[in-house]
Amino acid sequence: MSEIGVTEARDQLGQLVNRAEYNEERIVLTRNGRAVAAIVPVDVLRDLEAAEDAADLEAARRAAAEPGPNVPHAEVWGDLLADEVQHRSA
């Protein structure tokens, strides 16, 4: 895995994309020495998204299996929206 500054990467974007696509290289973009983003082969991104989906599904199954009353989806959204309105007016 290599690192490159965002400013430098801007000038080399085509080359960096080719390195990710054809060499399966993972390239970390940095700003002020801090990692802020990455260029990765699309298969790596798809695998990451699939892993996240599987983890979300497992968490939802565990939550659904918990004992006690369930909270309807509409109620959860209503509470979230009410919190958002309250936060914005504060």
Image (spheres, rainbow, N blue to C red):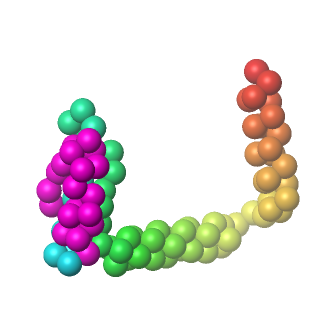
The residue drawn where x is 26% and y is 75% is: 21
In the image, the segment drawn in magenta is 1-21
Q: Is residue 35 visible?
A: no
As drawn, is 89 to the left or to the right of 28? right
Q: Is the N terminus in the top left, top right, bottom left or bottom right quadrant?
A: bottom left
Camera-side residue of 37 and 82? 37
Q: Quadrant of residue 51?
A: bottom left
The residue drawn where x is 76% and y is 45% is: 80
The residue drawn where x is 70% and y is 66% is: 67
Q: Is the C terminus in the top left, top right, bottom left or bottom right quadrant?
A: top right
Vertically, is 33 above or below 25? above
As drawn, is 30 to the left or to the right of 2? right
Reply yes or no: does residue 18 show up in magenta.
yes
Q: Residue furthest top?
A: 90
Reply yes or no: does residue 72 show up in magenta.
no
Camera-side residue of 62 and 8? 8
Report x, y in % for residue 38: 30, 56
As drawn, is 77 to the left or to the right of 1? right
The residue drawn where x is 83% and y is 39% is: 82
Q: Main secondary structure of the magenta part?
A: helix
As drawn, is 7 to the left or to the right of 73? left
